[in-house]
Image (tube, rainbow, N blue to C red):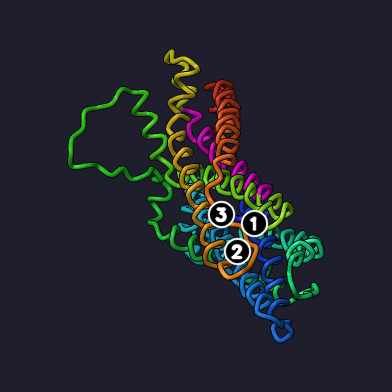
Amino acid sequence: MTMVTIKDTVKLFGISIVICCAAFVCTLFLNYRVDLIDIKDTIVGEQSQKIYDAQLSTSTVVCGVCGGCLIITSVIMLLTYIRNFIDSRSKELGVLKALGYSNFGIAKHFWVFGLSVFAGAVVGVGAAAAYMPTFYEVQSKDNYYDITSHSQYGVWAALILVPTVLFMVLSVFFAFRRLKKPVMKLLREDTASKVRVSRKQHAPLPFLKELKKDTVKSKRSLIFFIWFSAFCFACNTQMAFSMKDLASETMGWMILIIGLILAYMMLFLALSSVVKGNAKTAAMMRIFGYGENEISHSILNGYRPIALIGFVIGTGYQFGLLKIMVNVVFKDVENVKSYSFDFKALCIALPVFVISYELIMYFFSSRIRKLTIKSVMLEG
């Protein structure tokens, strides 16, 4: 049986990118942390000890916050894809179960989804290894002690193998749970989302407003991805401006590039799914005489408030995180500049976010305009 193939994992390149970013950051800071621990006994002087403790804490916080956040995002993306994969092939899976295949017999083939994690981790660790000398030079610029870069191959191997194995196991387990449906239910493709009926009776909304509301509610996971894309943009772009004074210009560029990659990648994947999922609706609305703006607005406009909320929370998050780093982690270190909210960074990040977001929305609106009944039926 070849229900799940390596070709299917190619669609998970988004997870590979997120894991790559997580592996890159964690490899740098974990490697640096291990080397810091190795020179603990060589630290002399009160100020050197304070800087040493602050660097050690920073490495722990960055790995925990950044790595943890990206891993959680990858898990959500993986589970969403597996759920959609099973739902889209429910008839085929139902036939296999009818032929006698067990749930685990089918689910065990989903281990291949872990290969996307392996690919991302390998690239991330490799890129970090190449950047390591520069990173150490930047980190040790104002230190009172010397630290030499050593290749911590055990750490590198763990950052590749542990996430890969965990994601393979998670893929099989989640697929096993999703396949616990009666055969007839799978054969009937009963994959429609369960609609929660409110006990309160509300007045019916106009069709276009109702469609916009239902589009957002139909795939709740996309709400997270669009929210997170705006969160990453706001958090990383504004934090990057502060890194020049708090850390280094190199660190700022690293944070900025990672943030923009995650933000735009998440947004493109989410909106692609929105357009694809509403292709038939858009084509039918065109037949019934609705204008192009009405169609695109009813499908895409519901996500604009979600993106705005993500930007606001990301702005607050980066301010709180940097405030804690300066006032708690580096509170005893001399010559550390005080940190206050950077309104200049906000005034740059917000217009760039709005313009780029609207350009992407326009791009997907143009894709909706190209949808016709013929093209939709041929794809179906």
Q: Taking 17 as reference, is 87 left or right?
A: left
Q: Earlier in the sequence, mark 1 or mark 2?
A: 2
Would you call the spot at circle 3 few (<14 residues within 10 Å), some (14-19), or many (20 or more)?
Answer: some
Would you call the spot at circle 2 few (<14 residues within 10 Å), some (14-19), or many (20 or more)?
Answer: some
Q: Provide residue 349's location: percent of width, then percent of height.
A: 59, 38
Name the residue carrying label 2: 62
Q: Taking 191 as reference, is 354 left or right?
A: right
Q: Earlier in the sequence, mark 3 or mark 2?
A: 2
Q: Taking 32 as reference, is 73 left or right?
A: left
Q: Provide residue 157's location: percent of width, then percent of height.
A: 71, 72
SS at mark 3 in the image: loop
Name which residue type carries label 3.
Answer: Tyr
Q: Earlier in the sequence, mark 3 or mark 1?
A: 1
Q: Is residue 123 above or below residue 209?
A: below
Residue nearest the observer in this picture, 316 or 14: 316
For the C terminus, the quadrant is: top right
Name the residue carrying label 3: 339
Label 1, label 2: how far apart the Cα atoms are:
14 Å
Name which residue type carries label 1.
Answer: Leu
Label 3, label 1: how far apart the Cα atoms are:
8 Å
Residue nearest the observer in this picture, 246 or 131: 246
Residue in view at x 65 percent, y 65 percent: 26
